[in-house]
Structure formats: structure tokens, C-alpha cells
Amino acid sequence: MPEIEPGDVTLKSLSGVHLWHAPMSSCSQRVRIALAKTGRDYVSHLVNLEQDEHATEAYQAIHPKGLVPALVDDGHLFIESIDIIAHLAGENSEMTAAASPRLLEMADAAQTDLKLLTFEYLFRSGPPPAPEKAAAFQQAHHNDWLTAFRRDFAAGFDPDRLDAAAARTLDGFRTLDALLADGRRWLSGATFSLSDVAWMPNVHRFRLMGWPFERTPHLMRWFDRVAARPSYRSALVDWQSEDTASDFAAYTAKRHSEGTDIRSLPALKAGSDR
Ligand SMILES: N[C@@H](CCC(=O)N[C@@H](CS)C(=O)NCC(=O)O)C(=O)O
């Protein structure tokens, strides 16, 4: 979805770039990478997802689905991270021209599975929200998909749902690996493009979960290359607190020792011929 009409009409009078985002959100990371790459300054509006700030009426008047990120550029509102990075890069840039629409669509579609697996294998490390806080979110947030997702998370995700998400994720990473097997440096060829921007946060996120990237060695080497870029540090790593990173690492290690980590899913079990 390209530009949308804001519910909050005061957005139309904003000048420059304004970004509503969250430190750890993969869709926000994507947009911050594009901003770093284009060198555009922006006004940062942090939305505290842990405190459910995206359930306020004020924020839902900015983003109609109550999600991050949202971006305003000289009074024009954009949501959907893939649309936002395309807008920032501009139609005529090298980053856009070199990108593959199919890889951008795949990155967009991969979001639901990334979210499910993140909640299960990283966010479950924290204490569950207090019942009154959970109830307030259900009441305040208008996005039925998100409120149902929160309820499913609290009840415990269906193991088949987790396994299916992992199987689709593996297929996606294998597709990228196969493209990179021809020796290309970046996902869509010789030029760093929006395809790379779109996929960087996904690989970063699954590494935190201990995903078996050894099965996709070309993708692993691609990630080493993107991780050496300054935008990886400034848009992803610098936004992730050391405490968060070490809590996730400890939780991933704990689940690994219990045999309940992401690698224990049938779709990913070593020796599985998927
Ligand atoms: N397709 C959307 C997805 C946006 C989305 O799912 N955002 C997540 C963070 S990456 C969010 O706002 N989550 C809020 C929540 O889980 O409560 C995009 O690419 O911008």
C-alpha cells in the first residue's frame, strides 16, 4: 500500500521525515537501514511496544493497523515497511532499480512467520503481561489480527503452527541461498539494493534464535558482508541493548539445553530432508 490518508490530519503539516518505530522491530530496522543508506535525517518517535503505546487512540490515528513503522515525509504518510523503503530509495535510484520485486514480496510475506517464531523463541523469555495489562490491550487495540495473536501467545502457540512457520522460513532462506550460490555479492546481483535492506533484519532476527544457518552457507556469507556495513550497526545493533541481547542469548541457550529450541522443530531437525 503506498501513501495513505492519515486519520490524524495534523500529520499533513509535518515537514521533513518523521519515523514512528521501535528499537527491536524488524520492520523498523528495515526502514532505519534505508534511512542510513539514503543519508536522510529524521525525527524519531519511539513507540514503546512493551508498554503497548501502539494501542493508544493517538497512535492508531497515525497507523490504522496500530503497528510500527509509520513514516511521514513532508506531510505524506506511508505505512508498510517495504513501501516505506521503496519510497525512501526513490523510483530512480540504483537501490530500487537493482532490487528484485519478488524478493521484496517474499520479505514482506515472511513477516508473519518471523513474528510468530520471535514471540515463541525470544519474547517468551520475559514474564507474561499482568492480566489487567493484557485485558486493557485487548480492549484498546482495534487490530483484530493482533489481539488474536496476543491471545494465542498467552495460551501457547499450536506446535503445528510453529512448525509450519519454520518450514516456510527455511524454504525462503533456501531460495536466497540458491540465488547467492552463483557467486553474486548481493541478493539481486552486483549492487547492494532494497532486496538486501529488506532481508537483513530477518537474518539478524533468526540468528538470535539460533537458526541453523549452517544449512544455507551462501546466505551466511552474504550476512557477514551486510553485517560489515555501517548501516547494520547504526540501524540494528546500536538499537538493541546489551541486556536484551544477553537475555535472548541466555533464553536461546536454555531452550537448547532443554531440547525445546527452534532447532527442535520437526521441520528443522538435523537430518530432516526438507
Ligand atoms: N507488514 C507490516 C508489518 C508491521 C508489523 O508487524 N510491525 C510489528 C513490529 S515488526 C508491530 O508493530 N508489532 C506490534 C505487536 O506485536 O504488538 C510492515 O512491513 O510494516
Image (tube, grey):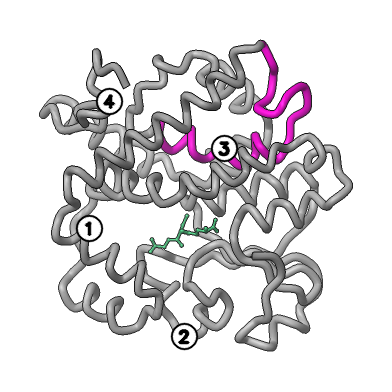
Q: Which residue is mark 4?
A: 268
The answer to which of marks 2 and 3 sits earlier in the sequence is 2
**Residue 260: image x %, image y %?**
15, 33
Q: Which mark is residue 199?
A: 3
- Which span of residues is magenta-colored? 183-207
Q: Distance of mark 2 from mark 3, alpha carbons? A: 31 Å
Q: Distance of mark 1 from mark 3, alpha carbons? A: 25 Å
- The local secondary structure at tag 4 comes to helix
In front: label 3 or label 4 = 4
The amino acid type of the residue labelled 1 equals Phe
Question: Which quadrant holds the N terminus?
Answer: bottom right
Task: Name the image quarter holding residue 197.
Answer: top right
In front: label 4 or label 2 = 4
The amino acid type of the residue labelled 2 equals Glu
The amino acid type of the residue labelled 3 equals Trp
**Residue sitting at 44 percent across and 65 percent down?**
48
**Residue 103: image x %, image y %?**
61, 38
**Residue sitting at 47 percent across and 33 percent down?**
172
Q: Which residue is mark 1?
A: 153
65 left or right of 74?
left
Compared with residue 236, is residue 15 higher up or lower down, i.e. above or below?
Answer: below
- The local secondary structure at tag 2 comes to helix
The answer to which of marks 3 and 4 sits earlier in the sequence is 3
- The local secondary structure at tag 3 comes to helix
